[in-house]
Image: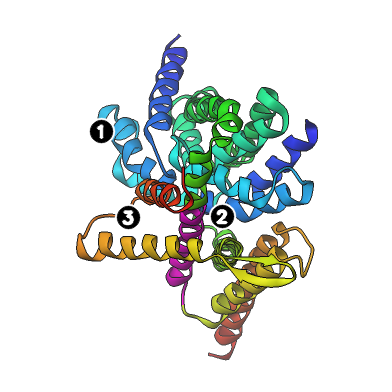
Amino acid sequence: MKNWKKCLELFGTFFKIGLFTFGGGYAMISLIMTEAGDKRGWIDEKELSDIVAIAESTPGPIAINSATYIGYRCAGVTGALAATLGVTLPSLCVIYAISLCVDAFMALKAVQSAFQGIRIAVDILILRAGVRLIVKAPRKPLPVICCAAAFALALMLQFDVLSFSATWLILAGALVGLAAQIVSIGKMKGGERDA
Amino acid sequence: MLELFLIFFRIGLFTFGGGYAMIPLVQQEVVAHGWMDGQTLMSYIAICESTPGPIAVNMATFVGSAQAGALGAVVATLGVVLPSFIVILLIAAVLKGFRENVYVDAALTGIRPVTAGMIAATGVAVTLQSLFSWTSGRLALDERALGIAAILLAGMVVWQRVLKKNFSAILLIVAAAVCGMAVYGV
């Protein structure tokens, strides 16, 4: 019984979080801290930064990852289910509702014109996201090469110069990272032997 | 329907570091399957940025709904959310030292610059596609689009540097909508 009540609470809290976050996962983090942390004491600040670190390191949206993790910690698998369902449902309903009228909406001339402008805003947003990530990247040779190579290859994919699944790039990045780590461990061991 | 699920499962599995990382992957699938043209996708992405919830989930729901109605929306959303759910549960339950694991860290360190490059490439590509077009075999610049871009960028600089306010994606979208209506007419 206590578990069900907890799950319901998790669902409700994360539904609220999902409903009131606009513009992406990071905006959600402070809301999560307020709702799950300050108000209900499910997590504290240190745990939140751990959660964010984990959520950034795993596939999927940060919002989903955080919800699943906090839900699990509070009430096991059912808790994780409740929290994740809660945070996903608002999106699902709102977007589905919009998708039903989007065609009629887009048929209006004013809307079409507005979206011609909006598409440019989206271009800028994506460029901005990319530039910020590039600026944040370490200035060491390997990351720079990986970034440049991924940029070039992705550009070729965009313009149909090459044809392969973009997920290969991500896999390649992971492998390069692993290889670099193995090489540096080897060097360290070599250094120990020499010393 | 199974195909839709698997496609979004894979997208969900390979998206590291936030919703924007998902854009190049979704774009490739949408184009490859001919579900909608690039411009329509960009419009959908704009809507996803302006509505509640994670961008990634919104995009999955939207594309899924466009493809296969209510069931499509649910299936796509389920697909994109499931990898996260499973991985996080595994980590929370089993792999306690996940974050400290040297190899996990190494793999992520490798993925980050790749994601940055991919998103930047997508940004460059869609911007070029908005500004230029092939008309009768020649590259033509859309001056109006360029004008709007210039206005928006100038606005961003003023907003952040002069007015010292935080960047707001929704504000940019609203400003762009106004510019669009002004420039292209209602």
Residue A185: horizontal and vertical position, in percent? 59, 75
Q: Which of the image's four quarters has the N terminus of chain A? A: top left
In the image, B15 versus B72, the foreground residue is B72
In the image, B181 versus B90, the foreground residue is B181
- Reading the image, the residue beneath label 2 is B21
Q: Give the label, 2 or 3, closer to the camera.
A: 3
In the image, A155 versus A175, the foreground residue is A155
The three-letter code of the residue at mark 3 reads Phe
The three-letter code of the residue at mark 1 reads Asp
Q: What segment is highlighted magenta in the picture? A: A119-138
Q: Is residue A125 magenta?
A: yes
| Chain on which label 2 sits | B
Q: Main secondary structure of the magenta part?
A: helix
Q: Give the label, 3 or 1, closer to the camera.
A: 3
Give the left or right position of residue A108, taking residue B152 as reference.
Answer: right
- Reading the image, the residue beneath label 3 is B167
Q: Residue furthest front?
A: B185
State whether discs 1 and 2 lie on one chain. Answer: no
Can the viewer see residue B110 in this picture? no
User: Sequence-wise, which precedes: disc 2 or disc 3?
Assistant: 2
The crowd level at tag 1 (other Cα within 10 Å; few <14, some 14-19, many 20+) is some
